[in-house]
Image: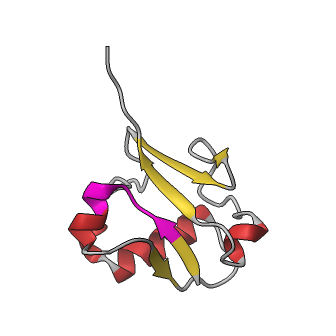
Amino acid sequence: MIRVVLPFHLRNLARVDGEAEVEVASPITICAVLDALEAKYPMLQGTIRDHGTLKRRPFIRYFACKEDLSQEPPETVLPDAVVKGEEPFLVVGAMAGG
């Protein structure tokens, strides 16, 4: 079971209290986790990744084990601590301002 931490507005949209948990088949990659998340919570489709291209939306970042994985390819395998459920995969809404 992979633990996923979502930003507040996406937790509300998915009606999730706390962390979301998804079953993911090996290999456990960024793309596989997001596919499982969108399959379990279809209302999240298009909020984290673009509907057509499946590219990460601007102002959304991915983190695992204190590492920013936002610029990594979707096929990037997640760290063992995330795979074992010891650490969550974080989807973070980035902020911009001026």
Q: Dividing the picture into quarters, in which one does residue 95 lie?
A: top left
Instruction: Count numbered badges in the picture.
Output: 0
Q: Quadrant of the N terminus?
A: bottom right
Residue 47 seen in render = no
* Nearer to me, 93 or 57: 93
Question: Position of 67 compared to 60: left or right?
Answer: right
Residue furthest to the top in view is: 98
Depicted 96 relative to depicted 75: above or below: above
Tell me which residue sits at (37%, 80%) in the image.
39
Task: Please name the colour scheme applied to the rendered image.
Answer: secondary structure
Magenta stretch containing residue 9, yes or no?
yes
Tell me which residue sits at (62%, 48%) in the image.
69
Depicted 90 relative to depicted 43: above or below: above
Residue furthest to the front in view is: 18
Tell me which residue sits at (28%, 76%) in the image.
42
Q: Dividing the picture into quarters, in which one does residue 65 lie?
A: bottom right
User: Measured from the top left, where is residue 82 in percent x and y?
Assistant: 67, 69
Q: Quadrant of the C terminus?
A: top left
User: Measured from the top left, where is residue 47 in percent x and y?
Assistant: 29, 56
Residue interval drawn in magenta: 4-10
* Nearer to me, 35 or 94: 94
User: Measured from the top left, where is residue 79 in percent x and y?
Assistant: 74, 63
Residue 19 seen in render = yes
Question: Position of 68 compared to 36: left or right?
Answer: right
Magenta stretch containing residue 21, yes or no?
no
Q: Dividing the picture into quarters, in which one does residue 64 lie?
A: bottom right
Tell me which residue sits at (77%, 69%) in the image.
80
Residue furthest to the right in view is: 80
Depicted 80 relative to depicted 74: above or below: below
